[in-house]
Image (spheres, rainbow, N blue to C red):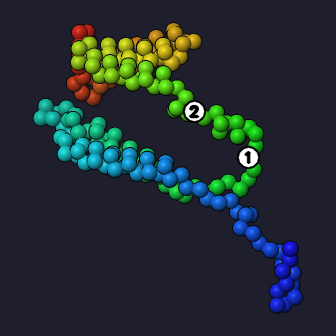
Amino acid sequence: MTATTPFNMATAAVSDSTEPKRVVNWPKLTFLGVLLIAFAFYTEIAMGMEWRTQAGRIGPGVFPRILGFTAIAVIVIAAAREVLSRPSAKPVSQAEAADEAAEPDLGRHPVALVAFTIAAAVFVALLGVLGAALAGVLFLAVTLWFLDPKHHVRSLIIAVTVPVLLYLAFQTGLNVGLPQGILPIG
């Protein structure tokens, strides 16, 4: 349908459907807002902790401060990306749609989530008894064995090397006192 202007020029009727509507994911923004508030309180508590001990070691407040400020930055960036994102006007190909559909859904693997949560709780419980290195080896071995059942040798190598190297780096390089446990390491 065409409309006539006072100057006798025919113009096409413009509809609002040509531009895609912007949809804001309010549940996601709400979740990010709650996380932001929680990490703001967490960082405030961390700022009250000493960052260096009297013995010259890294204090209990260093890593919580790093974690708090990093989490706040990541949350702010994620919220900004959500607010500033524009809908795509270009058509989506089948390959792009398949890639988007293949993204992981955390609700699809409840058994893995429960098993990982239990393994993490056991890791924390055994940290003081077995020590950081041995508890880390057991935690990684169990979780990698469960999550990657086709590559047991690779899982075992990762499960032994990563916790031991991290223990040695924190114990000797950073001079952080980690639980030694039953093994005479360090």
Residue 133: x and y in percent read: 31, 16
Instruction: Answer with left or right where residue 130 lies relative to residue 53.
Output: right
Amino acid type, mark 2:
Pro
Q: Which residue is mark 1?
A: 92
From this view, report whether residue 15 is shown above or below residue 171. Answer: below
* Residue 149 visible somewhere in the drawing: yes
Inter-mark Cα distance, 2 to 1: 20 Å
Instruction: Give the residue number, with chain letter if any, for mark 2.
Output: 104
Who's the residue at 28% across and 39% down the image? Answer: 64
- Residue 175, image quadrant: top left
- Could you say where residue 8 lies in the image, as x and y percent from the top left? 87, 88
Can the viewer see residue 186?
A: no
Q: Position of residue 44 (x, y in %)?
A: 25, 48
**Which residue does the image show at 27% across and 29% down from the upper left?**
174
For the N terminus, give its image quadrant.
bottom right
Q: Is residue 2 left or right of residue 154?
A: right
Q: Which mark is residue 145?
A: none
Answer above or below: position of 106 versus 155: below
- Determine which quarter of the picture holds residue 17: bottom right
User: Of residues 35 and 70, which is closer to you in this image?
Assistant: 35
Mark 2 is surrounded, within 10 Å at the Cα level, by few (under 14), some (14 to 19) or many (20 or more) other residues, namely: few
* Local SS, label 2: loop
Q: Image point 19% across, 32% down: which residue?
A: 57
